[in-house]
Image (cartoon, rainbow, N blue to C red):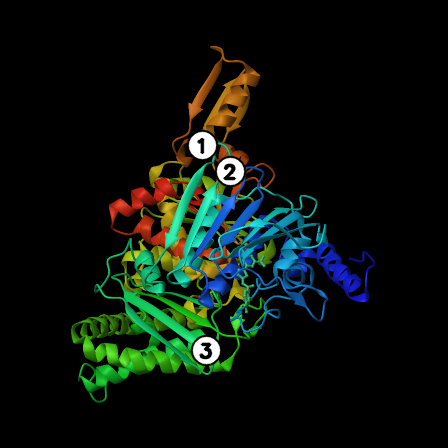
Amino acid sequence: MSTEYGADQIQILEGLEAVRKRPGMYIGSTSVRGLHHLVYEIVDNAIDEALAGHCSQIDVTINPDDSITVVDDGRGIPVGINQKAGLPAVEVVFTVLHAGGKFGGGGYKVSGGLHGVGASVVNALSNWLDVEIFKDGKIYQQRYEKGHTMYPLKVIGECEPEKTGTKVTFSPDGTIFEDTVYDYDTLKQRLREMAFLTKGIRINLSDLRPEKERRREFYYEGGIKEFVLYLNRSKDSLYDKVIFCEGEKEGVYVEVAMQHNESYNDSTYSFVNNITTPEGGTHLSGFRNAMTKTFNAYAKNNKIIKEGENPLTGDDIREGLTAIISVKLQDPQFEGQTKQKLGNSEARGAVDSVVSEQLTYFLEQNPAIAKMICEKSLLAQRARDAARKARELTRRKTALEGTALPGKLADCSDKDPRNCEIYIVEGDSAGGSAKTARSRATQAILPLRGKILNVEKARLDRIYGNAEIKAMITAFGTGIHEDFDITKLRYHKIIIMTDADVDGSHISTLLLTFIYRFMPDLIKEGYVYLAKPPLYKVEKNKKVHYAYDDKELNNILLEVGRDGNNKIQRYKGLGEMDANQLWETTMDPESRLLERIVMDEESAFDIDRTFTTLMGDKVEPRREFIEENAKYVRNLDI
Ligand code: TSJ
């Protein structure tokens, strides 16, 4: 074997060097998010093998040193010499950029948005990577370091001839990633999603790190049908069956599962090649078109809607709907600013025709369910009409009277939204202190009275009729729904300030639920915050210290000494502070603590569940949820 580098090898190395120089271009970022993408990238390859019909199990292990092992029982990456590169196919996979799927031939490779960059990118960004292939009774092995091949592919042993598969272990490069510690829950989340989206695949996740040892198995025989049941598990479903449509048209494989629940929200999630598309695209619009068309046709044919009556809108039909739309196609094109919106026009037609055809059949076969959905849609239609009238009234009013800001709002004088903040304050008395304390130029105060309407449990007409909600909508300036315009936002910080007790956190959750459902972009753009009032005041020799949690209290007590001379006050509400104290501890931009509400687009369906679970009726899921999942609740402080 010659050790001289040929032109091909030099090109290979330049390719991987480029990945190390600009990792963000290949995996989005070098934050923990990018770190986790490495795992998804490798697992995607095993999923492809499953989609090709050759793999039934994938084991993912977090090793004690935070390296990751992924094993599948597929055919094993081909080891024969690739003519073009003059190297074994497996080495091409790991050392040539964008080689994924091009080797071996015949495989049904689907590659997604950010992922699908190929195993070579993972290799380039790893300190070391080991691959073992079980094939033809032999165990092949090769190792790479920072993308460089350490030695030619070798046979390190034998195995039973029936045993086939691929095992990859890699250790992310700590000089490239900001953090190299894996988060079990993040991997769990995504692997569960992959298992839902690939019916019949068994995915095991094991954490072998000391103190963190855990194991989970994901296996969903029903695929996305089970995904829908999972999403609806803390809601009351309208009927027991899950409506399922499946088919292939024009090279697009389509799967849709859906079930209505008693809520008023549309929880539709779309995926392309197993990757979520939060901005939708042609597949989603094909689905919506088919739903509207099919239900209206059914309602008309069955005299549920009579001649001359208004047709149902898509929104009416999707009220309380939980749906998964999953399409798989060879060459997905992504559009839009964030390249997350599917552009392939054939996907629109494929989803539309598969859903129209099979949904029509389902409705005919299940008239009781069809009737329930139509009746719910008709109620939604009536509520929407009433809401529209209410909205038109307020719109006309503002047109006549100019910008009618709510009477309770103490607005700031600065008119540049970038400088402005609005404090939403619970109760008139705290609102009064906040008005005294505030910096008038840039801080506006909107006091709200008592409990806010729970938008999870109310239809639109009631929501629009609610005084507190109307006040917020007009104060923010953006409008909602089809009127929503983020450029009209009057404050770049929306700060929710409530008591640091159970009632207070309930109110902040209600407010966040409202914002999340009606103006989610405010959260996505990072404009929404929680104020963090202190929990304790420690006074000693006329010096005052504030503690925002118990740990801080302990630190302060250690510093000032634990003796009879210090006075500790536990704050139960904002009302216990005078205006000066409120300013100093909670409103002064120099010293206050704010918590920004974040929304991870990749787990939008999880946030949806956070709100329905926390605000819904079922007690059991709520307790279980709070116990098992602190991720988003952390920000809600419940
Ligand atoms: F990403 C990766 F390359 F590192 C990787 C690939 C990691 C893991 C865990 C599994 C795999 C992988 C690849 N599993 N199975 C395969 N299959 C193939 O590469 C393969 C095998 C046979 C044929 C064929 O036509 O005979 C074609 C392909 C693409």
Q: Mark 1–mark 3 contact, CB under 8 Å? A: no
Q: Quick check: is the Cβ at mark 2 less than 8 Å away from ligand 1?
A: no
Q: Which residue is mark 1?
A: 577
User: 456 left or right of 395?
Assistant: left
Mark 2 or 1: in front is: 2
**Residue 142 in sight in this render:** yes
The secondary structure type at the circle numbered 2 is helix
Q: Which residue is mark 3?
A: 252
Residue farthest to the top?
A: 564
Mark closer to the chain start, 2 or 3: 3
Q: Position of residue 368 (x, y in %)?
A: 16, 73
* Displayed-image quarter of ligand 1: bottom right
Q: Mark 2–mark 1 contact, CB under 8 Å? A: yes
Mark closer to the chain start, 1 or 3: 3
The secondary structure type at the circle numbered 3 is strand
Q: Position of residue 65 (x, y in %)?
A: 58, 38
Distance, label 2 to label 1, CA atoms, is 10 Å
Q: Nearer the viewer, residue 453 or 147?
A: 147
Amino acid at pointer 3: Val
**x 22%, y 75%: residue:** 374
Mark 2 or 3: in front is: 3
Amino acid at pointer 2: Thr
Placement of the C terminus among the 4 image quadrants? top left
In the displayed structure, 64 sits above or below 36; it is above
Q: Which residue is mark 2?
A: 586
Mark closer to the chain start, 2 or 1: 1
In the displayed structure, 347 sits above or below 543; it is below
User: 95 left or right of 620?
Assistant: right
